[in-house]
């Protein structure tokens, strides 16, 4: 294949190398396992540079999702609950997952239903910005659930344009 991607046809390696030398480019095997192997004429240094730039751009645009943990107790006060709820909403709006857990001490293990109610009301408080990934589950002395952020809301301008197109 030529520099612009046009096929040059099947030819011996010597002829392909001669063409590469004449055009002052490199002969690069693209598909060595094919019969016959597919080669392309290109500036290999420029190709590697462009690939590195693409990878760098992808790493820059990549967002690593972290899991933030919020710990509650089954006897938490309303103000503390609301404070932790606001923090969870902030984490979710930043795009992070949230693990909400309740730890039971001593005789509280007999009333795990109170902890489950706390987790469910916490999920209801975050319902605008989060989906429940895993429902409340008891594991030893802890009950936990996972919340994931909802997908970003579409742009208002885009919605208005869609309405105009439908009319």
Image (cartoon, rainbow, N blue to C red):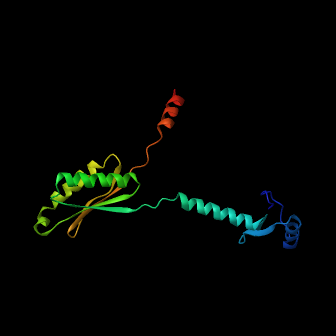
The relative height of residue 82 versus residue 158 in the rendered view (above or below) is: below
- The foreground one among 124 and 31 is 124
Above or below, 126 relative to 98:
above
Quarter holding the N terminus is: bottom right
- Where residue 23 appears, as percent x and y from the top left, is 86, 64
Tell me where residue 119 appears, x and y as whole percent: 23, 56
Where, by quadrant of the figure, is residue 111 drawn?
A: bottom left
Q: Where is residue 48 in the image (x, y as percent from the top left)?
A: 69, 66
**Residue drawn at the location 46% of the way across and 42% of the way down:** 154
Residue at x 22% of width, y 54% of height:
81
Left or right? Give the position of 137 relative to 153.
Answer: left
* Number of marks present in the image shown: 0
Q: On the picture, is 166 further left or further right than 142?
A: right
Q: Which residue lies most toward the top here?
A: 167
Which residue shows up at 73% across the image and 64% down it? 46
Asked whether, in this view, residue 106 is left or right of residue 54, the answer is left
User: Image check: 79 left or right of 7?
Assistant: left
- In the image, residue 149 lies at what x, y percent? 38, 52
Point 64% across, 65% down: residue: 52
């Amino acid at each position: 294949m030529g520099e612009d991607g046009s096929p040059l046809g099947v030819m011996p390696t010597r002829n392909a190398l001669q063409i590469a030398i004449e055009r002052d480019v490199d002969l690069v095997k693209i598909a060595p396992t094919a019969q016959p192997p597919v080669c392309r004429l290109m500036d290999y240094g420029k190709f590697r540079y462009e690939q590195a730039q693409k990878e760098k751009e992808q790493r820059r645009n990549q967002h690593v999702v972290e899991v933030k943990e919020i710990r509650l107790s089954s006897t938490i006060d309303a103000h503390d609950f609301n404070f932790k709820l606001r923090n969870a909403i902030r984490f979710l709006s930043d795009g992070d997952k949230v693990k909400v857990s309740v730890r039971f001490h001593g005789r509280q293990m007999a009333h795990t239903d109170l902890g489950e109610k706390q987790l469910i009301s916490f999920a209801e408080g975050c319902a605008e910005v989060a989906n429940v990934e895993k429902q409340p589950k008891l594991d030893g002395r802890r009950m936990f659930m996972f919340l994931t952020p909802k997908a970003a809301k579409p742009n208002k301008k885009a919605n208005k344009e869609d309405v105009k197109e439908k009319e």
